[in-house]
Structure formats: structure tokens, C-alpha cells
Amino acid sequence: MTASKSMNPVPVGLDDGYAVTKLVLADGRMFAIPSRARLGKANVTWIDSAEQRIFEYETESQIFAVGEIEGEATEFDAYPFSGLNRAIVQHALQQAGLEGHSVHAVSGLPIGSFYLKNGSRREETLARKRASLKQSVQPLDGRLPAGIAFHEVIPEALAAWYDFVITESDGGVQIEPERLQAPLAVVDIGGRTTDYVVVADQAVMHASSGSLRCGLLDVKREVADGIRGRFNLETVSERRVEASIQSGAVRLFGKNRDVTDLVQRAQRQLVERLYSETQRQLGRGAELERILFVGGGAVFLAAHIRDWFPNQIITEHPAFANARGMLKYLRYVCEASNAA
């Protein structure tokens, strides 16, 4: 590691979600990779090394293959503290060109994992998450690791609130006073969870905030079940299911098979469940100045959620709103310079 890399840590907003891992850097660049990895070696030999799309990493004496591979499910409670998570995050940092760099990062947890019902923080959980990503992860192809020297954790949907109230321009950074005091709600539609947070006068209103275990991975699971049932298959690959959700067709036995109805049905089930929970959490939203829709689900379901509230907006690049807010929190709110 060169002196310049080790002495100048790189600030990173890190949204290490169950479906997609997103990074935002201070120069505005944004990176996203599927949260896809599995325990063990890839067992693949690349004919052309330039085409390599699966990479191997070691952490705590376990080897993980990351990339275009049939990944293990990330939908388990310990995922944010797992070697699987660390390998995926390291791969994202490598894809962002941070090989050999020291990194200062802020990541997140769903609001229901961050707070207890009484509003107090789950300190043991937060400490476990902070410590996990600071553990060593070694690329097995000779590249230098990106080392996370400082790591803070904030609630995921609250990160999008920081993104909204802290604005950056050529003239510098500023906090928008009217946004800071106004009652705002964030609806963060993610992979495993959908988070709701209401902030008024810089305070989280826990009665209207929480997490629903429901998100885009439910659509993937429903479509996969439908394809297996319709075509009498024991298994169907994760990547094939993802392609079918995007295109409405799945390629099997050398032919494209229309599965538009399966995708639409899965979308409809998700939208109906999200709409019911959003109404329960926020009511009609009459006393809220703004309702912000963020997360990958805000992109995927944009046509279905665009008219739920007259005072709603889908933020710019909504899939990266949390990562942007995490970076702003790191740079302008928390004291990364005091990190040990």
C-alpha cells in the first residue's frame, strides 16, 4: 500500500442491502452490484482473464465467491454481520477502484433493527455491525484489499432524510432550514424490508416509523416459484429469474417463454401489501410537508406508487438516496477524524 493511499482515507456512503450493494463517493460517482455471493471457491476457469466476472475473497478463514454466480440467500437475520456480507462489500469497494485504500464508511440497518420499540438504540447490534465490516477481507487474486478503518451505522431510511436536508453545490454545503424543521416521511422500499421513518423538528416519530419485512426479493421469490411450477422445474437460476422480471420472458429449453403474467401478479401482490402498510403508517399524510419515496423499489414500482399522496416525490436516483445520505452524514455530521 502506498503512503498516499494509506494516509488519505476515502469517504464512502455504503448501502449494503440484501438485494443490491450501493456505494457513493465524494466525487459523485455511484456504484451498484448485486448482493450475490456464496461460500466456497468459484470452481471456474476463465478462458480469457479479461472476462473474469467471479472473484474470490477470504475472511475469517472462509472463502467466498462473489459476482456472476448463483448466490446464497442473503435474507437471514445475521447477514449484516456475516462473512458473506463482508465479501460482497469488499467486492463493491474493489469495483469502485478502492484497491489498497483506507476507507471511512457509513452504512445502515433497517430502522426496526436499529431501534427498539421504545425508541432506544440497539447498541449491541450496532456495535456488532460496526465491527464486522472492519474485519480483514483478502482478495485471492493478488489485489490489495480496501480496508475499512472507520465505520459508523445509521438507520437506512433516516439516511435518505440526511440526503434531502443537506444539499451540496458549487457554493459549498448547506442545510435547508425549511426541510430541517418540516415534518417529512421517508418510505424506503428495499430488497428484504420496507422502512418508514417520520421526522419532525429533527426528531424521529417512532409511532409512525418502523420496518415491514417485505420488498423486491418477494417479487423474485414469487416469480421463481411461478416459473418452477409452470414449467415443471426443480430449480431455476437466480440470474434467470432476474432477467425474466426485467423482460417478462424466461429462456428455457432454447426458447423464450412469456411469463409477463407471473411478473405482474408478483408486482401486484407487493404493491397491495406496501400500499396497505403505508396507509397504516402515514394515513393520508395531510400534515406531512413531503413524503419521499426512495430505494430500489421506488424505481421498480414507480408506475404503481406515483399517485399515492398529493405531496409525495420520488427522489433523484432513489436507489442511491440512502448511500448519498450516509456519505453526507460521514462528511458533515459525524466526527470521522476521531476514528481509532
Image: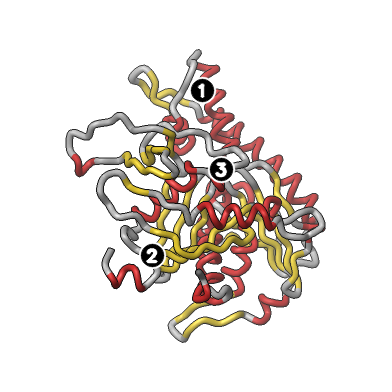
Going by the image, does 252 lie left or right of 292? left
Residue occupying image coordinates x 77% and y 51%: 279
The quadrant of the image that shows the N terminus is bottom left
Whether the residues at callouts 3 and 2 have beta carbons within 8 Å, the answer is no
Secondary structure, mark 1, is: helix
Colour theme: secondary structure
Say few, some or many: other residues with alpha carbon within 10 Å of mark 1 (under 14 / 14 to 19 / 20 or more). many
- Amino acid of disc 2: Ser
Instruction: Check disc 3 and report its element: helix, strand or loop.
Output: helix
Q: Residues under labels 3 and 1: Cα distance?
A: 27 Å
The residue that mark 1 highlights is: 227
Secondary structure, mark 2, is strand
Q: Residue at x 51, y 30 (%)?
A: 260
1 vs 2, front mark: 2
Give the residue type that dot 3 points to: Tyr
User: Vertically, is 80 above or below 197?
Assistant: above
Can you tell which mark lies on residue 103?
none
In the rendered image, residue 207, in percent from the top left (x then y), is placed at 82, 58
Residue 13 makes an appearance in the image = yes
N-terminal label among 3 and 2: 3
